[in-house]
Amino acid sequence: MKKSRIIRPSISPVQKIFFLIAAFVLSLSPSVFADPNLYNNQDLAEFANEWLGSCSSGNGWCNGCDYDISGTVDEEDLARFANLWLTPKDPVLSDDIAAWIMNNGVYAWWSYDRGVLLLSLYEKWLAKPDPLYLKLIKDRIDSLVDSSGNISWYSKTDYNLDNIQPGNLLFILYEHFGENKYLLAADKLIDQLVDQPTTFDGGYWHKQKYHYQMWLDGVYMAEPFACRYAQSSGDANWFDETGFQINLIATHTQHSQIYGSGTGLCYHGWDGSQWEDPPQDPCSWADPTYGHSPEYWGRAQGWYAMALVDCLDLLPPTHSARTQMLATLSDFAAALDTYQDPNTGLWWQITDKGYPRATYPENYTETSCSAMFSYALGRAVEAGYLPEVPYLDVSRTAFEGLVEHKLSYVGGYISLKDTVQVGSLSGAGDYDYYMSVGRVTNDYKGIAPFMRAALVYERMTP
């Protein structure tokens, strides 16, 4: 793979001189104009005391000033400190989420749930660069990727899109540390996508064992990685593939695209068996005319919503796929606005079957999809993909609903309830199946999007 340029925070020579001079002066009198609620003079003086010091985890990486765990407090750390300058220190909920992740430790395993959790911690590090966050991410990935780029517990021939998702962290670690093993591992994952089995019209099978099936979940698992690979390698074909896969699955699963009108919600998956050559026997859940599954499962749609927004962030601004992606997002967002529960601000496990309650008494407001939708809508407003009215309020109401109805504290750490354990199309894929699956507290698939939603909420709070 072509090695990508390392993108780092920028600081001008003038800014650098100003901060260093100011830091030197304030180190002589650190109490001048100190305000404990802002990153300012006192912190600058402390940073100056660590300047060019030799750091290790044993002393908190120069008392927390070696943000990028490079071993030295240097210009990159100064740039990150400059980004913190005069920002509030007041505790925010994302700090508590990060504390839970750090306390939990995230047992090393090459899996999408750990991948998305560590990715959310990295996004927290971008907002508040605690070096221990970055160290945890690096330690966990380094325990799984050897010097030749081989990945523990990964098998290409499973052709499991879930196993692509942790690869997003490879590009992040390469950008920071420049170790070639991360690129070698990314090449192995992209090699899977090159050979991934596809439907008659080119859509990725979700896994080898799910013949001719596309699932919404798989779009999030594969496509942000493909975009990052395109950025890193310079191979723009992976941008094209991303746009193709995202838009293709919408034609098969978004109700309004299938039927020409109606809701913008998306069915969990699609089975193309009957259109293969020769035709194959479809799954029992496949619609006999269109092939889609029977229900709008919340988390599958949440994965897809995050994939749309994250890939719009990564695709070139002039890419031809963006127009249809934005149209899909707009229609989807309007449907989420319609089906948001007016009492809690959350969304239901089966999105369109919250009411009447007497008809669907087993259905419940589900945490992971609500966090995913809150993040996706908030980020889409922040980036200009959706209008602020009504979607900023929809996003914020959902996040506040999660805090009110799903969050508590146990032993000083967050406790986030009502994340559905799993969702699959290996069986009937009907309402009764989704109601039968258990709910988990502090599941990574709930914590990670909750972190992402919190970060967006905090950035966009006046």
Image (tube, rainbow, N blue to C red):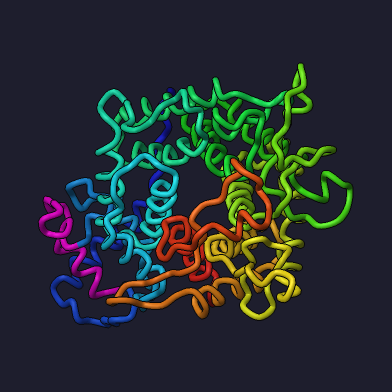
Q: Is residue 260 above or below residue 223?
A: below
Tell me: 381 left or right of 231: right
What main secondary structure does the magenta stretch of the protein show? helix
Determine if the magenta segment contains residue 234.
Answer: no
Residue at far top of view: 278
Position in image of residue 67 (x %, y %): 27, 55
Residue 156 visible, this orientation: yes
In percent of width and height, residue 232 lies at 46, 32
The residue most toward the right is: 260
Tell me residue 20's x, y (percent).
Answer: 24, 60
Q: Give the answer, above or below, for where 223 lies relative to 457.
A: above
Quadrant (top left, top right, bottom left, bottom right) of the N terminus:
top left
Residue 368 against residue 398 in the figure, above or below: above
| Nearer to the camera, 93 or 176 | 93
Is residue 75 in sight in this rendering?
no
Q: Residue at x 31, y 32 (%)?
A: 152
Q: Which residues are magenta?
A: 40-63
- The image shows residue 335 at horizontal and vertical percentages of 75, 61
- Seen at 61% across and 40% down, the residue is 315
Residue 47 lies in magenta, yes or no?
Answer: yes
Q: Which quadrant would residue 270 be assigned to in this image?
A: top right
Q: Is residue 237 left or right of residue 63?
A: right
* Quadrant location of the C terminus in the rendered image: bottom right
- Residue occupying the point 49% across, 26% down: 190
